[in-house]
Structure formats: structure tokens, C-alpha cells
Amino acid sequence: MSFRVSFILLVLLAVVGGYVVFYELQQKPKSEPNPPWFYDVAFDEITAIQVEYQGQRQSFASTPDGWGFSDTGQPVDYDRWGGVQLLLTGPRSARLAAEHIDNPRDYGLNPALTTIVVTLKSGQQITTLLGEKTPDGSNHYAQVLGQDSLFLITSAWGDVINRLVTEPPILPPTPTPAPEAEATPTAS
């Protein structure tokens, strides 16, 4: 191969390489839009939470002293309660599955496996219906009562909410010290 042909090929390689570096690699990747919020409320707006899962129900209310069980007034175990209020400010959906569904029963939404009612300071209630898990088990079918849209919500979110019923955040009993046994004199 002659020097002239090698030089022309080298120049062509430099031109193509320059094009790739300056035009193709400088373009930003097209990002997919963020999944929609299922609903969105302010953290401090929530005053009561009711969760019904498979026929069992637990209700919680905010008091000046913190969160407690609505029926007994007993405070919740904050080690278990942790971020529940934050979770209920509104989950980001995995995606909008359908704008409208004809038969909610197909998704486990009529009747719903889990019904969550979040009450706000204004008295407004947001009722969320969680249905069956998707075939791969990674999401729940979900719907806000009164809306036609069907969303996919991560199954981890639903599992945490369902545990409020199956394993309520009850404070563990305070251990009471055992009475000390009287020392008996030993014979020498």
C-alpha cells in the first residue's frame, strides 16, 4: 500500500472519528418521562389512616402526642411505624397501566384486596384500592376510588401497608423487673 493511500485512509478515519466525538457522543440520551404520581398530598396534611386488608381493619389517628390506634388511643410503635405517614403522602406509580378499565374485577379491585383511606386536615378522604399483584409479582394493580385510571404500584409499598393490618405496630410491653429473691444465710 502506498503512502498516499494510507494518508487518505488516515484522514478519512480522523474525519469520521471527529464526527462521532463532536456530534453523536455530545447528544444527550433521551430520557423517559418519570412515572406519574398515584396521588400526592403534603406530609403534615394527613390526620387519619384506615387500612382494610382481607376483611381485617386497622385505623390510626394523629394526636398532639403522635400517632395512635383510633379505637384504643394506644400509641403506635414508632420503630415499626417509621415512614408509614411518608409512604401514604402518595406513591409514585411504576406506570399508568390503562386510562380506563371496563372490569375492575379482572385486576382484583372489585372487591379490592386492600382498601386504604387517608383523611386530610380538610376532611377530604383519598381512598386507594389495591388489587392483585401483576403476574411477575413486582407490582399491585391500583386505583384511586372515583377515578378510571389503572396504575401499577410497587408490591413492596403494598406489602408494607398490608403489614399494618397483619402485624400492627403495637408497642411491645414494658418489661417489669423481677422481684429480687431474699438472700438466705448459708450455714458455715
Image: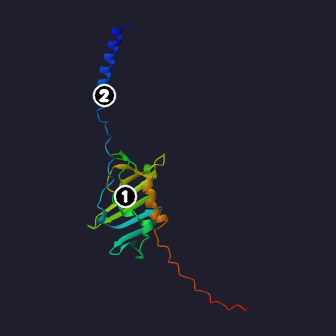
**Where residue 180 sits in the image (x, y, percent)?**
59, 86
**Where residue 6 sits in the image (x, y, percent)?**
36, 12
- Please name the residue shown 32% across and 49% down the image: 36
Gap between marks 1 and 2, in whole Å? 50 Å
- Where is the C terminus found, in terms of image quarters? bottom right
Task: Using the image as rendered, state which of residue 112 and residue 97 is in the foreground.
Answer: 97
Q: Does 96 sit above or below residue 48?
A: above
Badge 1 crowding class, 10 Å Cα cut-off, few under 14, some 14 to 19, many 20 or more, is many
Circle nearer the N terminus (1, 2): 2
At label 2, which amino acid type do we have? Answer: Val
- Please name the residue shown 70% across and 90% down the image: 186
Of all residues, the one furthest to the left in this rendering is: 122
Nearer mark to the viewer, of 1 and 2: 2
At label 1, which amino acid type do we have? Answer: Thr
- Please name the residue shown 44% across and 70% down the image: 77
Q: Which element carries disc 1, helix, strand or loop?
A: strand
Task: Using the image as rendered, state which of residue 179 and residue 1 is in the foreground.
Answer: 1
Q: Does 56 sit above or below residue 75?
A: above
Residue denoted by label 2: 21
Q: Could one spot residue 111 in this view of the protein?
A: no
**Where residue 10 sits in the image (x, y, percent)?**
34, 16
Give the image quarter of residue 109.
Answer: bottom left
Of all residues, the one furthest to the top in this rendering is: 2
- Please name the residue shown 37% across and 59% down the image: 87
Badge 2 crowding class, 10 Å Cα cut-off, few under 14, some 14 to 19, many 20 or more, is few
Q: Which element carries disc 2, helix, strand or loop?
A: helix
Q: Residue 128 — which label?
A: 1
**Where residue 64 sits in the image (x, y, percent)?**
32, 75
